[in-house]
Image (cartoon, rainbow, N blue to C red):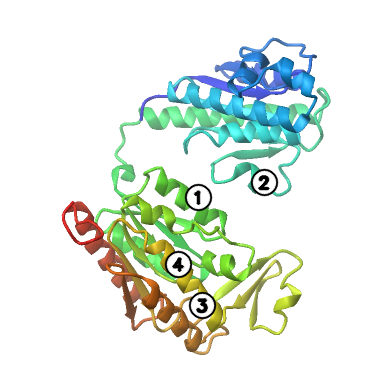
Amino acid sequence: MTEPESTIVLLATLDTKSDEAGFLRDCIRVAGFDVTLIDVGVHPGPTIAPDVPRQRVAESGGSSIESLLRENNRGLAIDVMLRGAGNLVAELCERNELAGVISLGGSGGTAIGCAAMRRLPLGVPKVMISTLASGDTQPYVGEKDICMIHSVVDFCGLNPVIEPILRNAAGAICGMVQARRAAAASTEPTAKGAPLVAASMFGVTTPCVNKSRALLEAVGLRLVPFHATGIGGRTMESLIEEGFFAAVLDITTTEWADEVVGGTLSAGPTRLAAGAKSGLAQVIVPGALDMVNFVGPAGLPEKFHGRTVFRHNENVTLMRTTAAECREIGRRMAERLNEARGPTTVLFPLRGLSALDAAGSPFFDPDADRALLDALSEHCRPPIHVMPVDCHINDDEFAERCCRELLVNLSKQESGVSKSGEKD
């Protein structure tokens, strides 16, 4: 990794938050780092001068400050400054001219700051101090490694509450930058050079993932698990697209149940698309497709009352998928899998798809599982192989089979065998 520069980018709407931005900038400077202050505000009023003025940000976003003031449309202004700040930050990163990004704000400032941060690669330090940080941060964080710090109070000048929070945030971004620089300069041997395998997991499929991790590490591969909670699946897909992985071991495709049936942990209709289009070696497992997740105090929607459910905890209710739902899940998954450009195998554990789907367990339903298997077998086109395995998903034997098949597919991938089975 090339050693990053020591300049930290600070994004702030200086028309309303000059005092806080100036304090934050000074804290970072005291720690020994340069700061590039970018003004993403629109209205007059800054009491400190930025390094990058608002005019340049607006122009990068495809407009001008004069035009935005004439329009007097806050939503439009945020969109333009969001786009412009993202473009400028991405350009600085490409030139290796930033070490990290920090921002502060309310709803508008958080939207602008986080959108710019989402343009940056994994590992670049990102800190957002926000009035919204104690609520639902998914729309702001998305699939990126953004650290959000709750401001506790609103931004309206300096006071004894906000000052220590800003000081701590400055320490956080500086510490992150120092840690990244130390990693870049380190000569100690690590496992970071091992090829990475993307994997999906849930608590009810963890034994399979843990066993697979040990087996893959024994042959020089490093498993990277993602929690199949909707955002977890989308993040995995995003990093597959970015080229992080050498192969995919998608053990827990449960997000498809939420997508089809209407649960709260859907990863969207493009789940499985990144692995398919990447040409990577893949093993796909219908892990935890026996359940739909409903997260939140409302619990199970009224239209599902009377269904087989399991109370996972006070905030999560699980509902067993029916045979009809499983058939539709299998059909939609097959649509994505048929796009695969690399060697792909579907392994189906006949004795249960999760810890709850086993003989004597609440979600054990062989007929529903069979409907899923039949749909996958019917709709997956050659050379996608759908292979039933006479094991439970959490049996050691099943994890061993997954890893063997993945190594076979990796061998095909490395030898240049295309989806059609012919040499590329």
Q: CA distance from mark 3 to mark 2?
A: 32 Å
Residue at the image position 46 percent from the left and 77 percent from the top: 353
Q: Looking at the picture, how far across and down is residue 369, in whole percent?
A: 47, 82
Instruction: Classify 10 Å Cα crowding around label 2: few (below 14), some (14-19), many (20 and above).
Output: some
Q: Secondary structure at mark 4?
A: helix
Q: Residue 326, which numbered label? A: 3
Q: Residue 333, which numbered label? A: 4
Q: Please, what is the three-letter code of the amino acid marked with disc 3?
A: Cys
Which of 85/393 is in front?
85
Q: Secondary structure at mark 3?
A: helix
Q: Please, what is the three-letter code of the amino acid marked with disc 1?
A: Thr
Mark 4 or 1: the one toward you = 4
Query: On screen, 49 above or below 302?
Result: above
Which of 193/92 is in front?
92
Q: Quadrant of residue 218?
A: bottom left
Q: CA distance from mark 4 to mark 1?
A: 18 Å
- Tell which circle, 3 or 2, labels the residue nearer the N-terminal end: 2
- Tell which circle, 4 or 1, labels the residue nearer the N-terminal end: 1
Query: On screen, 72 above or below 26?
Result: below
Residue named by callout 1: 235
Residue at the image position 49 percent from the left and 78 percent from the top: 327
- Tell which circle, 1 or 2, labels the residue nearer the N-terminal end: 2
Residue named by callout 2: 137
Q: Is residue 274 shown left or right of residue 27?
A: left
Q: CA distance from mark 3 to mark 1?
A: 25 Å
- Tell which circle, 2 or 4, labels the residue nearer the N-terminal end: 2
Q: CA distance from mark 3 to mark 4?
A: 10 Å
